[in-house]
Image (spheres, grey):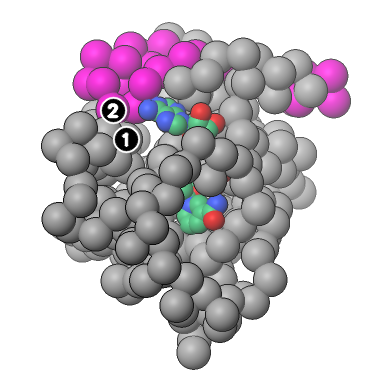
Amino acid sequence: MKAIANKVVLITGAGSGIGKSIAELFAKQGAHLMLSDIRYNNIEEVAKEIKNKGGLVSCYPADISKLQDVESLIDYTLSKYKSIDVLVNNAGIMDDFAPVEDVSDESWEKIIGVNLNGPFFTCRAIVKIFKEQKSGVIINIASIAGLTGGRAGLAYTVSKHGLIGLTKSIAYQYAGTGLKCNAIAPGGVETNIMHDVEPNPFGYSRMNAGAGNMPEAGTPDDIAELALFLASAKSGFINGAVMVADGGWTAY
Ligand code: NAD
């Protein structure tokens, strides 16, 4: 029996890296997928590959930091599949490692907009649906930067701490309603997240001072396997948890 057969799963940021791996693994496990990303071409490509292998998948473009896009995405998913069983808040962007004094208003708003406002918008909408269904799973892709102070710049660190707070508050307040909400905190993973980053020299050197202890980077598939566990019935008693997957980096 497949772990999440016929479950409707909405994944944000599904066009690359961790989100793409989650989409591919969940498709193999029988999920009915709604892939979303700000870059539509990328999710179309992922969806094409999944369809070629017999998966059930649809895609919809959305900038997760825009409330209107999120509302349209949820409406479209419901019109397509009638329900949503699992939400994976994966879309996210890295900052430039800047310390507090160098964070521009524009950068703060962008990072908080995508990494924290986006998951807030999706969670607020989805919890209403999950309450009616009396079931539902939220998986928030946070980061070890949400548990520590030295793995990114100020804005990213704050956004991921906030995402962990969002996770715990939802988990606690809706415990016993059939809803579970957990976070994954990856360490370094080989993806495209660093693609456009121009590092702030001071912040980057502070971050790198601890990077010598970093084990090899993980793969997006490492994180997808954990997401599958959290989406499946096997993790039924896990709620409000932050599951670290960093090869031991924060164990030091
Ligand atoms: P990635 O850049 O490969 O993928 C991120 C995806 O999010 C991209 O497809 C991008 O187009 C999409 N996206 C960006 N802004 C968006 C927006 N406004 N609306 C919708 N989609 C948007 O990076 P990744 O490493 O796969 O990142 C996935 C998640 O994992 C992020 O939340 C990231 O913070 C988290 N994470 C990554 C690492 C790592 O080392 N790669 C470590 C810890 C946490």
Residue under the point 44% across and 37% down:
91
Foreground residue among 235 and 116 = 116
Proximity of marks 2 and 1: CB atoms separated by less than 8 Å? yes
- According to the picture, the residue beneath numbered tag 1 turns out to be 114
Which corner quadrant of the image does residue 180 belong to? Answer: bottom left
How packed is label 2: few (under 14 Cα within 10 Å), some, or many (20 or more)?
A: many
Membership of 65 in magenta stretch: yes
Foreground residue among 203 and 111 = 203
Label number found at residue 65: 2
| Mark 2 within 8 Å of ligand 1, using the beta carbon | yes
| Mark 1 within 8 Å of ligand 1, using the beta carbon | yes
Residue under the point 56% across and 39% down:
195
Give the image location of residue 139, x and y in percent. 43, 50
Answer with mark 2 or mark 1, whichever residue precedes in sequence: 2
**Residue type beneath disc 1:** Val
Secondary structure category for the residue under label 2: loop
Q: Which residues are magenta?
A: 50-78
